[in-house]
Image (spheres, rainbow, N blue to C red):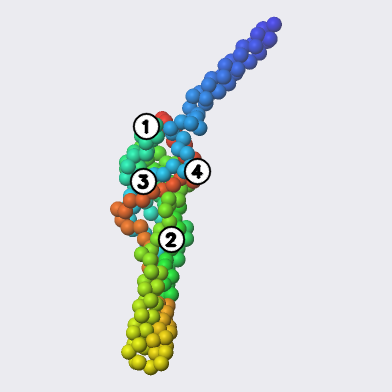
Amino acid sequence: MNLWRIRTKVFAFFSLLFAFFIQANSQTEISPTSVYNIQAGTKILVQMDNEINSKVASVNDTFTTTLAEPLIIREVVVLPVGAVIEGRVTKVNRASAGGKDGSLTVSFETLRLADSAKREIEGVLDKELEAVSSQKLKLLTIIGGTAIGGIVGALSKTENGALIGVGIGAGAGTAVALLQKGKDVSIKADEKFEIRLTKNVILPAQDY
């Protein structure tokens, strides 16, 4: 009889202990609708700490950005100004001849808060980087060569001189355009831009 009572008490003790842990976990779990569960698609305005440029950057180069304004969800500040988001260069192409512009692809992978808390994130640039268009310059060069050639041909006063001049001018303009180098792209220091999250980020409320 005593052994049966001891077993009953032990069973009751572990049942209560199990119930306690279940309750504790349910209280700390973040609801999918919580303001601390930042949804994929959320945009965050940041400011670049140090410039990155397709002219000198390499794959796996890292850089940091700082929140330029707080992220507020339903009137609650979930990310304060000063939080740091670390990024990494994942692909880079240098500008080259023929008016080919450079390109940079970056990802945002780590969020660091003022209290040293860290969260892994997945984010991308909301807008792709664009060079000051060298394609427009290339087109203007060809058009300019065509126009000059036409004028020179017309002044020659020979039959079909204008048409010949246009052809020569267009060819010369195209040749010059092909020799022109494209523009590199960059994010300059202190430049502000938006990051778009591609995966939910859970920020437990007790971190704040």
Which residue, given by chain and number where applicable, does mark 3 sit on?
45
Q: Position of residue 162 (x, y in %)?
A: 39, 86
Q: Is residue 153 above or below residue 174?
A: below
Circle 2 crowding by C-alpha within 10 Å: few under 14, some 14–19, many from 20: many
Query: Residue 180 location in percent, x, y?
Result: 38, 76
Asked if labels 3 and 4 touch by Cβ distance under 8 angstroms, the answer is no
Q: Which mark is residue 109?
A: none
Q: Is residue 88 above or below residue 20?
A: below
Q: What residue is pinned by disc 4?
A: 199
Task: Kindly report the distance in space between the C-alpha atoms of the residues bearing marks 2 and 1.
Answer: 34 Å
Mark 4 and mark 3 lie on one chain; the one further toward the N terminus is 3
Location of the N terminus by quadrant is top right
Using residue 49 as the reference point, say whether residue 89 is left or right of it.
Answer: right
Marks 3/1: CA–CA distance: 16 Å
Contact (Cβ within 8 Å) of mark 3 with mark 1:
no
Give the numbered dot on residue 76: 1
> Mark 4 falls on what kind of element?
loop
Mark 3 or mark 1, earlier in chain: 3
Question: What label does residue 104 carry, if any?
Answer: 2
> For the residue marked with disc 2, what is the amino acid?
Leu
